[in-house]
Image (cartoon, rainbow, N blue to C red):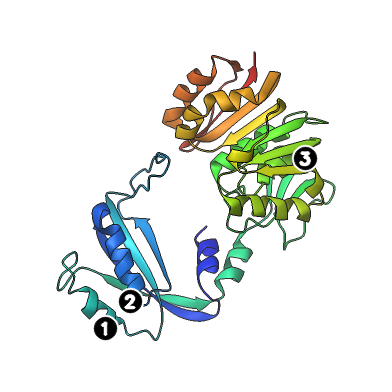
Amino acid sequence: MLYWLLCQLIRPDMPWIQLIIDTKADHVEQVGDMLSANGAQAVTFVDAKDTPMYEPKPGEVMLWPETQVVGLYEADHDMDGVIARISKSKVLGPGFPHKLDQLEDKDWEREWMDNFHPMRFGQRLWICPSWREAPDPTAVNVMLDPGLAFGTGTHPTTALCLRWLDALELKDKLVVDFGCGSGILGIAAIKLGAERVVGIDIDPQALLSSQTNADRNQIGDKIELYLPQHQPELMADVVLANILAGPLRDLREVITAYCKPGGKLVLSGILAEQAQEINDLYSQDFQMEPIEIEGEWARVSGQRK
């Protein structure tokens, strides 16, 4: 996803320099603000120690204990001046450790597009970038441009849910998609036969991305999209929630209420070590299926009692 992030942040066909500073989590925002104030076109935070990151509580921003702050500058920017100015701060000080790297001059958007290939999930389903030809025109093809929202099929949690959907009989079903992101799961459900999808997300950008992708796949009239405060009351045949373990705990009653008796449930966004806890929590109302693990991530699923 690095290429996608870069193409969202910077102009193509220009050389860039990145200033990398290792710091503690307590100082990350101060350092980031200093880089922004000194001409950085973008500032990102990167794990410096390959430390696992668990989900934050609502409203909380979590950072790694050892974090790299990366500032992106145009190649002709006065980096000596930047370093001289920020070295006067108490947080960094004279001679603070840092690294300057030159980024290759290339069209980052084109680079990302070239590296996003059609992917097959299960027996019928393909996720295809909107700018590429579908490898099998007779397959169930979802044409996708994620925009600023999560969900391309490359992440294991999305892949786990897509394979689960591909194996399901969805003809004429009503589906609810919590945390719809790019719309990938809901659109796949419709293409696989679902009659209607209700997508819910806390991010207005995700709702826009979902609708755009639904329209691209000529099924825009079959998807309804809501912020949580506007979500409707209904009971669905299938409920999808590819979010995180924390919200899955907190929203158990809400998610469960959307699934009608005999309906199907799939949950992901769960680390492998969290899967059994989530499975046990939902087993109060669902007959649970075997947990599916892919790498560090897990899928939990079941049928409403």
Q: Among all residues in the image, which is located at the extreme right?
A: 138
Give me the residue at 71% from left, 27% from top: 236
Please give the label number shown on residue 38.
2
Give me the residue at 60% from left, 17% from top: 286
Please give the label number shown on residue 265.
none
Which quadrant would the C terminus be assigned to in this image?
top right
Precedes in sequence: disc 3 or disc 2:
2
Nearer to us in this view, 83 or 51: 83
Mark 3 Cα-neighbour bin, 10 Å: few <14, some 14–19, many ≥20: many
Q: Amino acid at mark 2?
A: Asn
User: Residue 233's spot in the image, x, y percent?
Assistant: 68, 29
Give me the residue at 77% from left, 48% from top: 141
Precedes in sequence: disc 1 or disc 2:
2
Residue at label 3?
190
Q: In this rendering, would 252 be left or right of 218?
A: left
Mark 2 Cα-neighbour bin, 10 Å: few <14, some 14–19, many ≥20: some
Q: In this rendering, would 66 be left or right of 167?
A: left
User: Residue 193's spot in the image, x, y percent?
Assistant: 81, 36
Identify the element where label 2 is drawn: loop
Give me the residue at 53% from left, 64% from top: 3
Residue 247 lies, with reference to residue 219, above or below; the image says above
User: Residue 271's spot in the image, x, y percent?
Assistant: 45, 34
Confirm or deny contact between disc 1 and disc 2 (CB under 8 A): yes
Q: Amino acid at mark 3?
A: Ile
Q: Tell me the distance, in whole angstroms, between the alpha carbons under discs 3 and 1.
A: 55 Å
Q: In this rendering, would 37 be left or right of 202?
A: left
User: Residue 40's spot in the image, x, y percent?
Assistant: 38, 74
Please give the label number shown on residue 81.
1
Q: Amino acid at mark 1?
A: Gly
Q: Tell me the distance, in whole angstroms, between the alpha carbons under discs 1 and 2.
A: 9 Å
